[in-house]
Amino acid sequence: MTSLINLVRSKFLDAIRSVNPPSRWKILVIDEHAQRLVDSVLKQFDILEENVTQIELISDNREANPGLEAMYILMSTNQNIDRIVKDFSGNQPRYGKAHVFFLDALADDLLQRLFQSPAEPYLATVTELFVNYWPVEAQVFSMKEPGLFFSMYSPPRGESEYAAAKVRLQEDVQFISKMISNVCISLDEYPFIRYFFPSHRSPLGPLTPHASTRPAAAPEPGHRWRTNMARGEQARQYESVEGDHVSKLIALNVQRTLDDYKKSNPKWPKDSPRPRGTLIVTDRSMDCIAPFLHEFTYQAMANDLLPIGEEGTKYRFKFNTADGVEDKTATLNDLDNVWTDVRHMHMREAIDKLMADFNKFLTDNAVFNGEGAASLNDMKDMLANLPQFQEQRDKFSLHLNMAEECMGKFEQEKLPLVANVEQECATGLTAEGKTPKKLVEEMVPLLDSRDISNLNKVRIIALYIMHRGGVPEEDKRRLYQHARLSMPEQDAINALVGLGVALLKGSSSGKMPLKARQDDGDYELSRYMPLLRMVIEDNNNNKLDQSLFPYTKDAPSSLTAATSGSLRSGNSPLRSQTPQQPASSLRSARPGWVNKSAPSQRNLENRQRVIVFVAGGMTYSESRECYKLSNSLNKDVIIGSTHTITPRTFVDDLKVLDLEGRGSKALPNGLPQARGKQQRHPQEYYDTKYYTRDAPPPRPAPQKSLAPPRETSSRPQQLSPADSYNSQYSMQSSGSISPGPGGDKLKKKKGFLKF
């Protein structure tokens, strides 16, 4: 099974281990972006254990160490090339040799600059790692670029700004495509590529067809009709902007990037028994329902209801101990086995499993002679008296607090009633599989209630409008009045137009060809199936409509034409008509985790891959479905996005969508000013994005005076930023360090250099 975290971790460790100076010890030089990326998969101890005696920021004032060899892990920018050249210019080089590892592809002109510089005799290795992306989970990667949501969907603020806004988005599309390509190259995957093509509506945001961005129209001939080929390239270019959807542009750019890499590396990808995978590129506008729904699986519910920061990884809580209350900050990642075991379970199942695992932990360690924990409160009391098992105690304590707080909010915010209305709007069906006849009667009291938060009211109204396919303007105004929404909250709903949602009855937006299906699971408050799951399943069954998800280039030879049983609205399966009990709690009639069998072990190492990229933000429900589909389809399903969203962050971003993000958390000052109608070279984009300031030069030491010293108060000596960083990371060797001999033979390859 592919783990992106382990993959990137091994790439860095292999790079570090490949540098073996005769003196054994080496220095690691790193830039700020590479430092954050390395820190996300490696601990300082892991690095220092590989005979790294010191870690230095390339932007700091670094002391010369000509007796040691240095390895650089850097972004491929002009600024970093200049810094490397500077390290080996002058009378004395800063290091004995340089082993340079770039996170991304290095442009040919930068490569030539490096080889023709004074640093060339000292270069022992120049390698591209292709790991410039964030592996946030084993099967999830992110760009951590929430500001791209506004670049894709914010409408230009004036008629004169369309051309510049489109150019800015095209630059961002190239950046997105390079990150997706890095994922494919690092996985040694040359996939078939499909993309979401919603022909029922025009492109969104800056890609909306406009006179200033459309090529000049071809003169109409005098003939009555002509074939498309005979009409000429000018006419085809004029009409092509009608289909320039953001997912299409991203997919075509990824295809070009991978094709170019293939030309430079004919033996890529390596021969493997693994079948060729598929990359599916879509965007947030494909499913605007999923971000609004209350989810009741552990990870999704916790990120919706609790103050979890840093894209769902940091949670602060209070823990009761025998000595009092402690403030804790927990990291939610794949190193926490309790978290990975329960994060995709329904909350009720997660609590049951936590209690079962906790009681097993007590039995295995013979901590208590009495009975085990029977409730969350029992667990809380017993955890306070387990200081000798601190690590496991902290894990149970963390998830106990999270589960308890989630369940408290579930009751306090009346989520059973809210979620029932949400599910009827999202699926168009009641829990019994019938058309909801009393939806308005159920919804209006919730909008009138002061016990329901305005955020939840925004979510209900947005889902209701999408369920109806738009409502009359007067009905929309009355809904806002019932809910007592502020102007920014109304703006959030109105901004859905920018994502292709029809708000008004009879608007020009065409009908979405994808229709929601219901999940046949055990929980009536979790019936909605994200559209992404339907897309992946139908792609696996060769039923995904090729007009809705065309290929960029070649398609699998075994692919059959889209059949009538695809994603078209008329063929969506319904839930069983058997009546179910009312949803008064989260508990199901039978817990699903008890009888789950282990995933099939056949061909786990050679399973076909499906990589999905959601431009504009992915939800936790979508990432959960990818894990589940990996087991049910026996494939490695990997999901990535520009960023991860929660219902709160999605609504907050919609509030300022028409303001180009001004006032948002991601872009407080809004989108950067568009630079003109000409697209910048990708290298210039990178140089701007990853630019960092160099530390100011150190102050010269004061000269000694012959005059008698004055009486001054003694002050503690302060470390410079560089010294402070080095003192935190450095480890001195007890053995002697001798200078290395002359440089090894330079390992280089024209265009792309493989590790």
Image: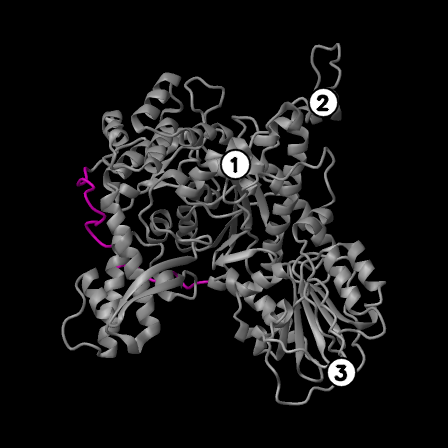
Mark 2 or mark 1, whichever is nearer to me: 2
What residue sits right under mark 3 in the picture? Answer: 740
Residue 547 visible in this rendered orientation of the protein: no
Number of other residues with Cα within 10 Å of mark 2, as a class: few under 14, some 14 to 19, many 20 or more? some
Residue 584 belongs to the span the image colors magenta = yes
The three-letter code of the residue at mark 2 reads: Ala
Hey, which quadrant is residue 274 in on the image?
bottom right
Residue at 26% of width from left, 56% of height from top?
A: 404
Mark 1 or mark 3, whichever is nearer to me: 3
Left or right? Give the position of 603 relative to 598: right
Give the farthest residue toward the bottom: 735
Range covered by the magenta-colored residues: 579-603
The three-letter code of the residue at mark 1 reads: Ala
Residue 664 visible in this rendered orientation of the protein: yes
Q: What scheme was used to colour the molecule? A: one colour
**Closest to the observer: 168 or 349?**
168
Hey, which quadrant is residue 77 in on the image?
bottom right
Q: Which mark is residue 697?
A: none
**Closest to the observer: 439 or 2?**
439
Mark 1 and mark 3: Cα distance apart in space: 63 Å
Residue at 42% of width from left, 30% of height from top?
A: 493
Chain-order first, disc 1 or disc 3: 1
What residue sits right under mark 2 in the picture? Answer: 235
Residue at 74% of width from left, 22% of height from top?
A: 216
Secondary structure found at label 1: loop
**Closest to the observer: 377 or 633?**
377
- Image quarter where the C terminus lies is bottom right
Residue at 18% of width from left, 39% of height from top?
A: 582
Residue 425 spot, x, y in % from top left: 32, 31
